[in-house]
Image (spheres, grey):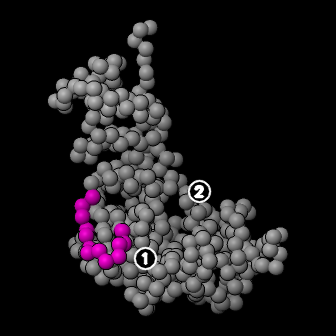
C-alpha cells in the first residue's frame, strides 16, 4: 500500500488488481481486516474515527462502499447468525 | 552499417530477399520483408539513419504482402503479417507504410513483457528523461516532434520502455506518425523536418511520418532515468499552464495506460510507484509550441 498524501494505492495480489482508496475506504478495510463487523458497528467505529455524525445518510454511503468492495473481492459478507 | 550506406537498389533487394531487411530499433531487431515496389522508396528515405542488424537474431518478423479482395478484385490491397499471422484486416496498397509502422508497434505492444511498456512519448534533456503520457487530446507526437528538433533527444513518441529493476528507460526512436492538422502544424513550425508522404484515408485520417533525427538514432542504445512526467493537452487559444499534478492522479493515469501493467502485476505496481515518487509530475495545457518549449525548457534546465 502506498500513501499519496491522503489517497492510497493498494495492490491486491490474489486478483492482480490495483485499487485507489481515500482515507475512508482505507479505514473500512483496516477495520474489517481487524475483525468482522456489522454495518452498524462498522459505521459507529468510522464515525468515531473521522468525528462524523452517525446518521442514515452516512450508513447508506458506507453500505454502498461495502457493496463496491464486495464486487471487487476486497471484502466478503459473513452471516453472524450462523 | 546504416541503411543510407546501401544504394536504393541494394535496399530494395534486401527488403525483397528471403533474409529480409533487418533493422535495429532500440533494443529490438525487426526483420522486414516486402516485394511491394511502392514501399521501398519512402522506407529507404525514412529509415536512412537506422543501423542494419545483419547477423543478429530478430525479435519480430514482419511482412507486407499483396492481397486480393474478393469483394473488390481490381483494387490492390496489402496485408501486414507478423510471424505469418495477420493481426488486422488488409488495407489499400497506398496504406502500406502506415500498416507496417502500426503493425510493428502493435507487435511490440502485445509481445514485449521484459519491459514495463507505457503508452507515452519520451524525450531526454540534460541526461534525464521527460515522459509525455498519452491521454485524449494530448498531442504527444506533435509536441514530441517539436521538442526533438529543439535540443531534446528522442526516446520514442509511442512507448516508454522501462526496465523495472533499474528504473532506466530505453530509447526506441521510431518513425513518428503525425495525423491530420498536426502535419501542417509541424510543416509550418519545423520546415527542416523530413516527412514521409501524406497517406490519406487511413483509420486515423491523413498520416505523415516524421523521420527521427540522426543523433537520436545514433544514441538509441543509451538509456536514462526519468525525472519529469508531464501530461500535455493541446487546447486552441488557451494561455499556457504548467501546474503540479497530484501524484495519486499521475499514478492512476500512468498505470492505466501501460500496455502490460496487469500482466506484470505487483512488479508493475512497485515500478510505477517508484517512478512517480522519483519524478516531478505536471499538467501542461498549451496552444502553441513556442510557449510550451519555454515552459518545458525551464522545467528541465539543470
Residue B287 position (above or below residue B251): below
Residue B186 part of the magenta-drawn span? no
| Disc 2 target residue | B111
Mark 2 neighbour density, 10 Å: few (under 14) some (14–19) many (20 or more)? few
Q: Nearer the viewer, residue B194 or B141?
A: B141
* Quadrant that contains the N terminus of chain B: bottom right
Q: Nearer the viewer, residue B83 or B246?
A: B246
Residue at the farthest top position: A82
- Residue drawn at the location 67% of the way across and 81% of the way down: B94
Residue B243 part of the magenta-drawn span? yes
Along the polypeptide, which appears first: circle 1 or circle 2? 2
- Residue drawn at the location 70% of the way across and 76% of the way down: B92
- Residues shaded magenta: B233-245
- Residue drawn at the location 40% of the way across and 46% of the way down: B269
Indicate the chain on which mark 2 is placed: B
| Disc 1 target residue | B142
Q: Is residue B154 visible?
A: no
- Quarter residue A55 falls in: top left
Residue A56 position (above or below residue B159): above
- Quarter residue B58 falls in: bottom right
* Quadrant that contains the C terminus of chain B: bottom left
Q: Position of residue B241 (x, y in %)?
A: 25, 70
Q: Position of residue B23 (x, y in %)?
A: 60, 74
Mark 1 neighbour density, 10 Å: few (under 14) some (14–19) many (20 or more)? many
Q: Is residue B98 left or right of residue A73?
A: right
Distance between mark 1 and mark 2 Cα atoms: 26 Å
Amino acid at each position: 500500500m502506498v500513501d499519496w498524501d491522503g489517497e492510497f494505492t493498494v495492490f491486491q495480489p490474489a486478483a492482480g488488481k490495483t485499487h485507489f482508496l481515500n482515507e475512508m475506504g482505507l479505514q473500512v478495510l483496516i477495520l474489517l481486516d481487524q475483525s468482522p463487523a456489522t454495518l452498524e458497528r462498522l459505521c459507529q467505529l468510522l464515525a468515531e474515527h473521522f468525528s462524523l455524525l452517525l446518521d442514515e445518510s452516512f450508513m447508506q454511503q458506507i453500505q454502498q462502499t461495502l457493496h463496491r468492495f464486495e464486487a471487487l473481492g476486497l471484502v466478503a459478507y459473513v452471516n453472524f447468525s450462523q | 552499417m546504416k541503411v543510407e550506406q546501401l544504394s536504393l537498389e541494394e535496399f530494395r533487394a534486401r527488403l525483397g530477399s528471403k533474409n529480409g531487411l533487418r533493422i535495429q530499433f532500440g533494443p529490438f531487431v525487426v526483420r522486414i520483408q516486402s516485394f511491394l515496389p511502392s514501399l521501398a522508396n519512402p522506407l529507404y528515405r525514412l529509415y536512412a539513419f537506422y543501423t542494419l542488424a545483419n547477423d543478429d537474431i530478430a525479435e519480430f518478423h514482419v511482412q507486407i504482402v499483396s492481397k486480393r479482395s474478393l469483394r473488390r478484385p481490381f483494387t490492390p490491397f496489402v496485408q501486414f503479417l507478423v510471424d505469418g499471422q495477420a493481426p488486422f484486416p488488409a488495407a489499400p496498397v497506398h496504406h502500406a507504410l502506415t500498416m507496417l509502422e502500426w503493425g510493428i508497434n502493435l507487435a511490440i505492444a502485445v509481445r514485449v513483457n521484459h519491459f514495463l511498456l507505457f503508452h507515452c512519448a519520451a524525450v531526454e534533456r540534460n541526461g534525464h528523461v521527460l515522459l509525455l503520457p498519452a491521454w485524449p487530446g494530448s498531442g504527444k507526437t506533435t509536441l514530441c516532434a517539436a521538442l526533438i528538433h529543439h535540443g531534446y533527444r528522442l526516446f520514442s513518441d509511442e512507448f516508454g520502455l522501462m526496465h523495472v529493476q533499474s528504473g532506466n528507460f530505453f530509447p526506441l526512436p521510431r518513425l513518428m506518425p503525425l495525423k491530420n492538422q498536426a502535419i501542417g502544424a509541424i510543416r509550418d513550425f519545423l520546415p527542416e523536418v523530413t516527412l514521409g508522404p501524406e497517406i490519406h484515408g487511413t483509420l486515423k485520417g491523413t498520416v505523415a511520418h516524421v523521420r527521427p533525427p540522426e543523433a537520436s538514432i545514433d544514441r538509441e542504445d543509451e538509456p536514462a532515468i526519468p525525472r519529469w512526467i508531464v501530461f500535455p493537452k493541446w487546447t486552441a487559444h488557451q494561455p499556457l499552464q504548467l501546474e503540479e499534478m497530484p501524484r495519486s492522479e499521475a499514478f492512476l493515469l500512468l498505470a492505466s495506460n501501460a500496455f502490460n501493467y496487469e500482466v506484470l502485476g505487483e512488479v508493475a505496481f512497485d515500478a510505477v510507484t517508484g517512478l512517480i515518487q522519483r519524478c516531478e509530475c505536471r499538467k501542461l495545457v498549451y496552444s502553441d509550441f513556442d510557449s510550451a518549449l519555454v515552459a518545458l525548457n525551464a522545467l528541465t534546465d539543470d
